Image: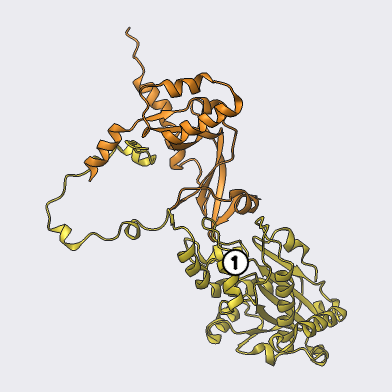
Chain colours: A yellow, B orange
Amino acid sequence: MDLSELEEDNTGRCRLSSPVPAVCLKEPCALGVDEAGRGPVLGPMVYAICYCPLSRLAELKALKVADSKTLSESERDRLFAKMEKDRDFVGWALDVLSPNLISTSMLGRVKYNLNSLSHDTAVGLVQHALDQGVNVTQVFVDTVGLPEKYQDRLQQRFPGIEVTVKAKADALYPVVSAASICAKVARDKAVKDWQFVEKLPDLDANYGSGYPNDPKTKAWLKKHVEPVFGFPQFVRFSWRTAQSILEKEAEGVIWEDSSAEDQEGLGRITSYFLSESPRRHTPHRYFQERGLESASTL
Amino acid sequence: MESSDEETTEKQRIHLRSATLCDAAPAIVHLLPCEVLVNGPAPVERFFTPAIRQRPSGLEVSFRGRILRGEEVAVPPGVAGYVMVMNEKAEVLAELERRHKRRGLEHEEEAQARSEPLERDFDRCIGATASFDHFHLWGLETIPGPDAKVRGALTWPNLAAAIHAQVPED
């Protein structure tokens, strides 16, 4: 799997896809969707689709693809290599969502939560397969959130396709297992070869699994806090683990969109009954609009 | 509370070390849409600068996991940009003394600084450490654009000069 495009710029999202097997353009296909790296506080999240003609699902199954979580890294690599060999009937595509994209989406003025980001990415990948001309007739998705709601949404979006959203779909349907292997292989490779945007001379690569409850990951986060900038972009700032470390170990930051109420705190209730203290002289609107104040001290 | 502040203000004088304005090296400065509650050095070159991307819509970077979009703003004619640092008078004198000894030279400014009777040990000195004729203005998620407060603020010095200028008598 060639992730060089990601290594060039890993601040946004990056899509990779296999060539579309000719048979998938003609014959009706099943398409599986799965993700890897949803939970970790470090590194990208990868969404993958894998598709194969209905008539050849048995062959895909014969590769002994299984839920990627039940496989070792070397088994996953081996299975992915096998799928690459079977490129005459198996196709895949994936979206790598950088930790920076995840942070900035979740911490935006308008919050874009991880579920919506996931759903939209999955929809984007299915659409991508359709745009490439893959004759998709069935879609299988491993659940994110409530399966019913997700299924309704996807079914509405793709009315001509039979959509199945199910918990543990990655263990039940070979196309989903195959997608989960693609996603996991890509996530592992992306993490292993991660090109840090920042210039960090004494970077410690021993960050453990990347899951928030891993003591190694926690220790790594604490070690790499920068008082002003927080963390390298490899870290998902929006994760609670990252936020609480920042609260304790980094300098405070007040954003211009944090409401005035938050900043000043509400006035005491008794303040409404007291006579007003002499008002401070407010400058002319001209100065207020330009953020200008007269300085009496430096 | 406030009045005691004012008292100290009245007593304290701030001296501009004008020589520093001439040899201040150009620097790249960034104006962020947030306040970082600390004053001090930060590894901008290691964390921030390498993360800036040129996108079709303009400059893009992220800070503390939030996206910033930015543009370059030129300092208008008639205004100069400096990064100023405040020192206690005593510190400055000591520094001048050291420099003087090292070079074995006596600059006019230094001689003046020591003989200046108006300066006292608790006075402070302000000097430029860098200069700039443009800066990066960053907005939270959107490019600040022509309505940015700082752009308006930069028009004030010229307006102030105009309204305070002598009106020619006709």
Q: Mark 1 — residue?
A: A235
* The one of A130 and A64 positioned closer to us in this rendering: A64
Total marks placed: 1
Q: Tell me which residue sits at (68%, 87%) in the image.
A: A170
Chain to which the residue tagged by mark 1 belongs: A
Residue located farthest toward the top when viewing the structure as drawn: B170
Image spot of residue B150 (x, y percent): 45, 40
**Viewport quadrant of the C terminus of chain B:** top left
Does residue A131 appear anywhere in the picture?
A: no
Image spot of residue A78 (x, y percent): 82, 83
Image spot of residue A105 (x, y percent): 55, 65
* The one of A224 and A172 positioned closer to us in this rendering: A224
Q: Residue A83 is drawn in which quadrant?
A: bottom right
Q: Tell me which residue sits at (17%, 44%) in the image.
A: A278
Left of A258 or right of it: where is A196? Answer: right
Vertical order, B5 against A95 (above or below): above
Vertical order, B103 against A266 (above or below): above
Left of A135 or right of it: where is B165? Answer: left
Amino acid identity at mark 1: Val
Label 1 environment density (alpha carbons within 10 Å; few <14, some 14–19, many ≥20): many
Does residue B39 appear anywhere in the picture?
A: yes
Vertical order, A180 against A124 (above or below): below
Q: Secondary structure at mark 1?
A: loop
Q: Residue A190 is drawn in which quadrant?
A: bottom right
Left of B38 or right of it: where is A17? Answer: right
Q: Tell me which residue sits at (81%, 84%) in the image.
A: A79
Image spot of residue A183 (x, y percent): 71, 77
